[in-house]
């Protein structure tokens, strides 16, 4: 759990077609990108040729997680594989959260 939001992921692999969907939810910030990287590596390790990362249930994602996705996309493309990201959430940073609190009048 990161903050108040649970981080979850589910890796569904169809072995016959060598495709996978990785569904992720919650806030992917701080050290949560390590778990994201682990799940991406799992898909590569089982031989997925096409990996879809579904971020529809993600409430925020930080730059480290975005870099992890970009790195894995590049790595997969270099080996003739495909990575597709769908349902992209808003980029959440400490600055963005502070601005949101200021606008809402919430204490820091």
Image (cartoon, helix red, strand yellow):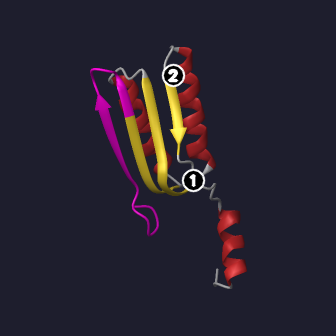
Q: Residue at x 49, y 19 (%)?
A: 81
The answer to whether 99 appears left or right of 35 in the picture is right
Disc 2: which residue? 76
Q: What is the tally of numbered marks visible in this picture?
A: 2
Tell me the CA gap for discs 1 and 2. Answer: 22 Å
| Nearer mark to the viewer, of 1 and 2 | 1
As drawn, 96 above or below 81: below
The quadrant in which the N terminus is found is bottom left
* Residue ID at (66%, 77%): 101
Is 10 within the magenta?
A: yes
User: Residue 74 versus residue 81: which sits nearer the camera?
Assistant: 81
| Residue marked by disc 1 | 89
In the rendered view, would you say 78 is above or below 2? above
Where residue 11 sits, quadrant-wise, is top left
In the rendered structure, the answer to whether residue 29 lies left or right of residue 108 reads left
Q: Which residues are magenta?
A: 1-20
Using the image, determine if residue 90 lies above or below residue 102: above
Decide: is 92 above or below 107.
above
**Residue 45 pos. (x, y %):** 35, 24
Q: What residue is shown at x 62% (from left), y 59% (from top)?
A: 92
Quadrant of the frame with the C terminus: bottom right
Give x and y (percent) for residue 46. Answer: 32, 23
Residue name at image x 52 percent, y 33 percent: 84
Of callouts 1 and 2, which one flags the residue occurring earlier in the amino acid sequence?
2
Q: Could you say whether the residue bearing mark 1 is in a helix, strand or loop?
A: loop
Q: Whole-percent x and y of residue 77?
A: 55, 19
Compared across the picture, whether 49 is left or right of 84 comes to left
Q: Secondary structure at mark 2?
A: helix
Tell me, yes or no, whether the highlighted magenta stretch contains residue 30.
Answer: no
Crowding at mark 2 (Cα within 10 Å: few <14, some 14-19, many 20+): some
Decide: few, some or many residues near mark 1? Use Cα within 10 Å; few <14, some 14-19, many ≥20: some
Q: What x and y, as percent, mark residue 98? A: 68, 71
């Amino acid at each position: 759990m990161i903050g108040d939001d649970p981080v979850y992921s589910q890796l569904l692999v169809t072995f016959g077609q060598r495709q996978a969907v990785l569904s992720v939810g919650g806030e992917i910030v701080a050290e949560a990108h390590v778990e994201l990287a682990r799940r991406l590596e799992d898909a590569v390790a089982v031989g997925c040729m096409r990996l879809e990362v579904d971020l529809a249930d993600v409430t925020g994602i930080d730059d480290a997680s975005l870099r992890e996705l970009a790195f894995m996309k590049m790595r997969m493309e270099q080996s003739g594989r495909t990575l597709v990201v769908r349902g992209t959430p808003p980029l959440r940073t400490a600055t963005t959260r502070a601005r949101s609190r200021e606008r809402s009048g919430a204490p820091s």
